[in-house]
Image (tube, helix red, strand yellow):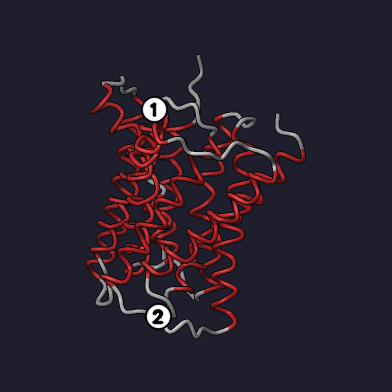
Amino acid sequence: MLTSRQLGALVLLTLMWGVNWPMMKFSLRELSPLYFRAVTMSGGALCLLAFFVWRRVDMRLPWREAGRVAWLALPNIVGWHFFSILGLKELASGRASILGFTMPVWTVLIGALLAHEKLHARVYVSVVAAVAAVGLLSAHELASLAGRPVGVLWMQLAAASWALGTLLMRRTQTALPTEAVTVWMMLMGAAFFWVVAPIAEPAPTWQFSAAMWASLAYGVFLNYGYAQIIWFGLARQLPPSASAFSVMAVPVVGTLAATLIVGERPGWTDLVAIVCVSVAIASALLPRKT
């Protein structure tokens, strides 16, 4: 059973992660995707670094660990954040969040492929449900005159990168605290985006509306900052089922919040896809009865 404090923190975390999707979509109206990632990720990483140093967590990165952390950052930070922001640019934010959270299914499939993990019957249910969601949204994008089917591809590449990164995190041995690994991965990812953004995109004017500055502050202080701190506090305490339900709720929150923040109206395909992805996540993550 969760305590009332844990439940409140879990609900707050789910809301922040869900609302972040339409907030990012709003930000892309005034700032290009790669510069957006560079700004928010570097700001969030520095805030986390300051917080954990204040909490006296050992945040040093020895040279012998730097290569290992960079290897983990490649799929977990660069792959996920690069492909997902490209997908979000092309798709409605609620739709992008639905597709991005097919990650648990990719985790199971990649684990079976690379580590020869056994596939149970529930995995097949998970795969069918996820494929149904992706197929449904892909068909809608192809049928729409304003559709961006390439966005579906970007989001699936993002989900697969996140899944691969999760598996690597489980299998990589390091003496560093989890907080240090995460912050250094984010700093390396931010460096990547600061290098790539000027090459791929025109320089921004940095003359934004007040709402845009507020959106950037949300990304830095809440999504990359406070939400991560909450997650570190809960990760050691939550049962797997609670984590699974939290993940399932994020696309729902993202889709509903998009109506208020960016004026997106979910259609029946989005609602059915949410159900399919929720079934897929539950089948992949919820513990089996023994």
Please provide percent x and percent y for residue 177: 55, 33
- Callout 1, which amino acid? Thr
Q: Which residue is mark 1?
A: 172
Q: SS class of the residue under badge 2?
A: loop
Q: Nearer the viewer, residue 243 or 67?
A: 67
Label 2 or label 1, whichever comes before in sequence order: 1
Please provide percent x and percent y for residue 270: 41, 60
Q: SS class of the residue under badge 1?
A: loop
Taking the spot 55% from the left edge, 84% from the top edge, the residue there is: 209
Q: CA distance from mark 2 to mark 1?
A: 38 Å
Q: How many marks?
A: 2
Q: Nearer the viewer, residue 48 or 257?
A: 48
Quick one: which residue is furthest to the front in this view? Answer: 63
Taking the spot 45% from the left edge, 67% from the top edge, the residue there is: 266
Taking the spot 37% from the left edge, 53% from the top edge, the residue there is: 99
Please provide percent x and percent y for residue 106: 32, 39
Above or below, 68 against 9 in this view is above
Quadrant location, the N terminus: top right
